[in-house]
Every structure is written in structure tokens, then in C-alpha cells.
Amino acid sequence: MPGNVVIYRLGSLGDAVVSLPLFKLAARGFPDARRILLTNSPIEVTPVANSIVDNMGIIHETIAYRNSMRDLRELWLLNRRISHLRPEALIYMTARFSPAHVFRDIMFFRACGIRHIIGAPTTEDLRLSKYDPTTGLWEREAVRLARCLSSLGDARLADRGSWSLDLTEGERAVADDHLRNWNGGESFICVSAGAKLQAKDWTIENWTAAMAQLSARYPDLGAAFLGAGSERQRADALCSVWRGPKLNLCGKLTPRVSASVIERAKLFLGHDSGPMHLAAAVHTPIVAIFSARARPGIWFPNQEGAEIFYRNVSCSNCNLKVCTIEKKRCLTSITPEQVTTACCRKLEPHKPTMPAALIANISRRQ
């Protein structure tokens, strides 16, 4: 009888998408096992990782818990639930930058009766991304995870299929239903202008200016706005300056159906976000605006030719959720005109009148 294997992956939508090749590696490594996802979940919300790997045949069951859980009874109940599964192994796929956090996790899983733990980043080399001095970038998170899980085999990160969401015809049909009666459905861009963290928000003023400029350039182009329900009001504000057809889908779609909509778009424009990684997964051209709260490269989309705006300022890698002292200068130094020009390059790649290189999108330290 097949045994159980627990896959431990925490994080948000983007964390789940960049882990797709590792989820598929785990499925290849334990093809006959019942694979159980252990992940975090906000109260009364479907676990984000689960919403990505559903319908892919990778995960058979999900155990979700509150990431901030401190109550001893809750911890005991989680321990009992995992112990009851009698897992033959745990695949560790979550980021931990502190040795203490990794040690704590290992002790907890040992207490659950799991003896075989694969991929726990017990050394600094495995916990931290490597720097490439030739590019000035740090390795992507998926590359670091693949190093951690190398004992399972090749993660096939260069294989396009490893990053595929394997969208179903049913998911594409739902996307069609949302686009069918919209007059912009034949030619549109997808925009995701919300940000959960203040430190990653390019500001409504910049977004409004960029949307107005881009719409003036392409007055007949449609714009579909994607994101959480909490981002709907901002999307409405941007709809008001967009001249062409507009469609506010914030809060209306699952992540996988959102990917099905993005798949049909000519361009994705947005922050460093989960929808940006969905765009990479479905191979839609990307223009992305990054804060410098993380090192350049780690969370960049897995897409060759993506236009990425990142300002490498003196306070880079701050990891702040709220930036007040520096007033988000890594983001405010990126202008609407620069972002608009980048979008034009993507929308008109063969038009000779477009400037070839107006800016160095990934700047040197300022």
C-alpha cells in the first residue's frame, strides 16, 4: 500500500508558482505515494499553494495551519494530525533564513514521527541565494530550492514544461465566460496594480499617470485588471483614466482562472506579485515594477526578455514591509514615462521608431 509523503511549503501565490518545478520533482521522486501538502492559510481562505497545484495531480490532500500559530493546543493538534499519517518522508520546500527556524522545524517534524527529512536548509549555503558577479543578480528562489532538493534528482528548471500550470479546459472555459461579452477581449493587456505591502506599492499616482499615458498611445486597447477583492477600488480608479475597453476582475477569479485570462493578454503589467509569476508561467510578456526590499534576481519572473524595473539603492535588501524613512526611493525613482515606454517596446517589438534602450531597468547602486 502506498505510503504518505508530506510536502512542506509556506508562502503566498508567488511562492507557490515559483515552486512548481519542485512540486513536480517531488511527484517524480515519490510517484506512488500519497502526497500531502502542509502549508499556511489565512482564516477562512483557501490555502494559496493549494489553489495553484489543484487539478495537477501533484497533491492528494492539504493540511493548512495559521503561520502565526503560537497556541500550544493548536500545535499539539497539528502534531497529532501529521503523526496520524505516519509519513515516510517530509520534503522541505520553504524558505528559512535563520538556523534557529530550521532547527525548530526539524524538531517539530521529528516529534511528529518523521525521520526522513529531505531538503532542510541546515547550512548557510542552502539557506541563502548565490550571487553572480557577471550579471549582478542573485539566483532565483527556484534555483536555491532545487539545490536543497538535489537528492531527489534534476528539477529540470530549464524545461518549459516544468513551469507549466497545466491549465484545464474547464479553467479556460471559465476565463472565456468572463471575457466573452467584453468588447476588449480580442486585444487587451492585464494589469495588477495592487500590493499587499506598502514597501512594494508604486503608488496610485504613478499608476494613474502610466495608465493614462499608455491609454493615450493605444486608445482602442483593452485593459483587464486582476487581483484580490481588496484591490478592486484601486482598479476602479485606474479604469476611470483608461480610454479603451476596461474590465475589473479583482476578487472574481481563482488564481488558475486568472492565469487563463493572462494567457490571452498581449502584455502583463504589474508589481512584483503572484499574478506576475502567473504571467511568466503562461508565457505572456511582462513589464514588472520591483521595490528593492529583496536582492535583485531572487524573485524575478522566470521569463527571458521580461522588462524588470529595479533600482539598486544604498538601502537595498531591507526586507521592510513599510518604508517611511527612505520614502520608497527605490520605487519613486521609477517614472511612469519609463514604464510606459517599456510597455510600448513589448506591444510593438518590431516598430523601428521605438527607442532601443531608454533606460537601464536594473540600475547600479544609487
Image (cartoon, rainbow, N blue to C red):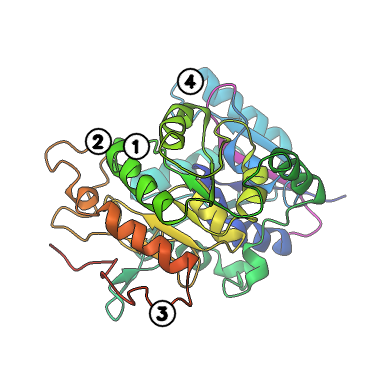
Mark 4 vs 3: CB contact within 8 A = no
Cα distance, mark 4 to mark 1? Answer: 30 Å
Sequence-first tag of 2 and 4: 4
Per the image, label 1 sits on a secondary structure element best described as loop
Query: What residue type is disc 2 on?
Result: Val
Q: Where residue 288 appears, x then y in whole percent?
A: 40, 56
> In front of the other: label 3 or label 1?
3
The residue labelled by disc 2 is: 322
Per the image, label 3 sits on a secondary structure element best described as loop
Mark 2 vs 1: CB contact within 8 A = yes
Q: Where residue 335 appears, x then y in whole percent?
A: 25, 53
Above or below, comparing residue 142 to residue 332 in the picture = below
The residue labelled by disc 1 is: 197
Query: Camera-side residue: 10 or 91?
Result: 10
> In front of the other: label 4 or label 1?
1
Cα distance, mark 2 to mark 4? Answer: 30 Å
> In front of the other: label 2 or label 3?
3
Sequence-first tag of 2 and 3: 2
Query: What residue type is disc 4 on?
Result: Leu
Cα distance, mark 4 to mark 3? Answer: 65 Å
Query: What residue type is disc 1 on?
Result: Leu
Sequence-first tag of 3 and 1: 1
Residue at left offset 66%, top offset 30%: 81
What are the residue bounds of the magenta stretch?
Answer: 30-44
